[in-house]
Amino acid sequence: MISATLRIEIERGVRKLLEEAGTSWPPELKVLVDRPAHPDHGEYSTNVAMLLAKTLRKSPMEIANKLKMELEHAKIAEGTFSRIEAAAPGFLNFAIDWNVWLNRHREYSAYQGETEKGKVVIEHTSINPNKSAHIGHLRNSCIGDTLARLLTRAGREVEIHNYIDDLGNQLADTVVGILHTKTEGEHVRFGDFCWDTYAKVNRVYKENPGLQEERTRVLHELEEGTSSTAWIGRLTAEKIVREQLHEMKAFGIGYDVLVWESRVVAEGLWEAAFEHLQATGAFYKVEEGKLAGCWVLRHGGEGSVEAEGAPGPDPEVHQADKVLVRSNGILTYTAKDIAYHLWKFGLLSQDFTYMPFADGVWSTDSQGQAMPFGRGETVINVIDYRQEYPQAMVKLALEALGYKEQAARLLHVGYGVVSLSPETAESLGVDTSAGKSSYAMSGRQGVGIKVAELLQVMEESIESKRSRQEGLSSREIAAAAIRYYLLKYHLQTEVVFDLRQATEVSGNSGVYLLYAYARAGSVLEKAGADQTGSGKALMEPPVPSFDGGALELPERQLLKQIAYWTETMDAAVRQLAPNLICSYAFELSLLFNNFYGACPILKGPADRVELRVWLTWKFRETLGKALDVLGLPAPERM
């Protein structure tokens, strides 16, 4: 990878300058290699000379020129760069020798990042099995699936988990609703019926608070797992999970194993974890006061204890000790999550058995067989940023038990939640008179956009805008458009979902990428027909031989973006950031379309046609890699 090698060489040159000045490396100094904004400034740039000015007590330009001489003396330009220049007010710019790059393009286009070894366990989706999935759930699934694809392309062994909370309050509420309320109206799917039932029972709770005691009874019976109520809960959860898997499959999202929370308890994983925790000073039983009888995980310091039965911690207070077992004996979600994570890292002797569930997906089951799931070296949990505190408590439990290495390899990929734009919220019947910039979805109130309904609306929008019906179906295009829409934002960004914007097919959209890929295929097919008469796209054309200095600007800009693919991959892997791949793919497609419009690809001198056909092929190959990581199709036709 060119940028990584360049950074190492720059750091070596900086050390030499510091040694000559009798000065040690400043602790705050970090060498960064960036991309210049102006194309005339080359392909890479660093501002390290400006950062060194105060330490070396010299002007940035003087330092930049000295560093340039050190790098030229080290001959880093030979075989990689055509020039190194110092530019005011103290930048060092580096221009790639494109003749060399073309001769070595296979080496430069192969992923060369440093990846850790061992299995990565990625948990994502993990929707409560009490109703249909909505777009907030879908953002989680798209992020998790893309991270799995990203790490797989980077050479890691990846195992994908979907944790099914079949012992939680939400399923209990739906069961109470089924047993004690009447939901009317036509429902195509069971999950949609449960969507309305869940919202209705939460309204009834307000009218009849005593009914909430029924939830406590149902929770006990779900955990015991032997009563008719438990069977109703089990059948409800299984039916909804099957529907949720079907919904996710439309977006190319799959799983290796479903881990049911009830099996964490039934297989003795929590019992084993409880014994381990009792041996530490961080886990204790409250003997008096409001929380008497609760087992609590100590956070440390002078923090308070989280209130028993509270729906969740105040996001501003992360110092509360965490109740793991309530005074009535019911386990909290975090308790079972701690046991689950001890198992994920292979730290418990207890294990699950498994049965096939659907489409190559395994499921924990008491009547199943042994399978080599779990035992990960790294664990990644894709859960929205509001779950930072429970995730921190799981990490704290691992540390308290002496598993500091595993705690360091437990990574929480948090993301901003999805809310609704005022226009979209109003269309769903939400009162928008408060004039907010966005409105939260609420399962308890039945407010949200179901995944299946969104896909249907998007499919109809795509269908109405298509002039031709070739290649991908409108449904496939719709799924790709939605998936890209949910991936393109920075992870921490709250996505304000607007139905009108989401159905756009131009601009920074998944549809724009698909059209660019199909356009390149059409050009290559014509090029192949011209040469072979077969009408089929060429295999990889020969690497052209040309004068790199004679590249036209659109050619150079496209080639430069192609060259940035491996380091974009590396940054996305290191940061676990799918949006970096989205930004790269959109910029690549923009530059190709600019190249397509400015440079006649199949007309002109033979050497120019050869170069442009190869550039088109290389663009298509590179965009295809990005589309694969993003989970989008690579269409021959649109």
Image (spheres, rainbow, N blue to C red):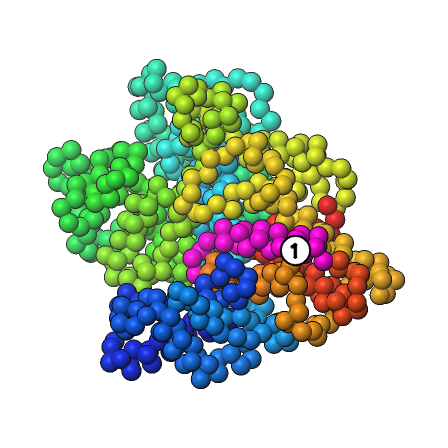
Q: Which residues are magenta?
A: 573-599
Quadrant showing the C terminus: top right
Q: Magenta segment: does it hold 526?
A: no
Task: Report the number of numbered marks.
Answer: 1
Nearest the eye: 138 or 618? 618
**Rendered residue at 40%/32% (across/down):** 170
Write down the residue under mark 1: 592
**Rendered residue at 16%/44% (across/down):** 303
> How packed is label 1: few (under 14 Cα within 10 Å), some, or many (20 or more)?
many
Residue 6 at what x, y percent from top left?
A: 46, 73
Question: Does 325 appear above or below 626?
Answer: above
Residue 344 at what x, y percent from top left?
A: 39, 56
- Direction from residue 366 to residue 361 in the image, left or right: right
The answer to whether residue 162 is visible is: no
Question: Does 590 appear above or below 78?
Answer: above
Q: Farthest residue toward the top?
A: 207
Nearest the eye: 66 or 186? 66
- Direction from residue 18 to residue 168 in the image, left or right: right
Residue 112 at what x, y percent from top left?
A: 51, 70
Question: Does 428 appear above or below 472?
Answer: above
Nearest the eye: 60 or 128? 60
The amino acid on which the numbered mark 1 sits, given as a three-letter code, is Phe
Nearest the eye: 550 or 591? 550
**Rendered residue at 38%/36% (across/down):** 168
- Direction from residue 602 to residue 312 in the image, left or right: left
Residue 342 at what x, y percent from top left?
A: 34, 56
**Rendered residue at 22%/35% (across/down):** 307
Q: Magenta segment: does it hold 592?
A: yes
Label 1 secondary element: helix
Q: Quadrant of residue 49?
A: bottom left
Query: Taken as a whole, is the magenta stretch helix, strand or loop?
Result: helix
